[in-house]
Image: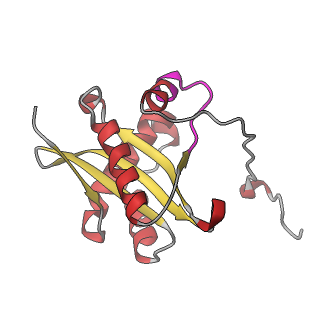
Amino acid sequence: MPAIVIRLATLEDAPQVAALVRTLDLHYAGADATQPLAPTLAMVERSMREAEGTRYALAFRDGRPVGLACFAVLRPGFRLSGLLFVKELFVEDQARGQAVGAGLMRWLADHARTLGLTRIDLTTEGTNMRAQAFYERLGAERMDKVFYRFNLSTGVLSDD
């Protein structure tokens, strides 16, 4: 089996990142809710240029991107040590079961440690049992937290 190469994405990788983000959206949301490639690419490029905190790691097999992690470094965190928050972890269907996801998580852990961060946080849908089993196999600790969302498109928290 060919080796998996994982690295931090650069602006030059934006088209590959956007293609994987779109594939992720198609996988989870379906074609009706997925944006075309052009606005997806524009969002990825904007996030990279503005250095807003979003970072991307790409996993390659045979020179082709097959996995993606979208993450951010958040500080201050517990005892000012900060944390790495994983927003998305995705592996293309044909690369699943080939240690790509585990490789991405290990790369994220190594990257976090080099930045002096002491933990990785992430969420998954309560119904996504495969993802939960995957994270638990890697040693993740299930937390008893309540997750909230403010849907700003509905006008919540506005002065109106």
Question: Does the segment drawn in magenta span residue 153?
Answer: no
| Percent of width and height locating residue 97 | 28, 26
Q: Which image quarter is the C terminus in?
A: bottom right
| Percent of width and height locating residue 152 | 74, 58
| Percent of width and height locating residue 72 | 50, 61
Quadrant of residue 143 in the image? top right
Q: How many numbered circles does the render carry?
A: 0
| Percent of width and height locating residue 68 | 35, 48
Which residue occupies 47% across, 56% down?
Answer: 71
- Front residue of 58/117: it is 117
Which residue occupies 30% across, 62% down?
Answer: 9
Quadrant of residue 24 in the image? top left
Side of 143 where 42 appears, left or right: left
Residue 60 to residue 73: above or below: above
Q: Which residues are magenta?
A: 122-132
- Front residue of 14/113: it is 113
Residue 123 to residue 108: above or below: above
In the picture as drawn, the residue positioned furthest to the right comes out as 160
Q: Which image quarter is the N terminus in?
A: top left
- Front residue of 120/124: it is 120
Quadrant of residue 37 in the image? bottom left
Side of 60 where 120 appears, left or right: right
Which residue occupies 62% across, 28% down?
Answer: 126
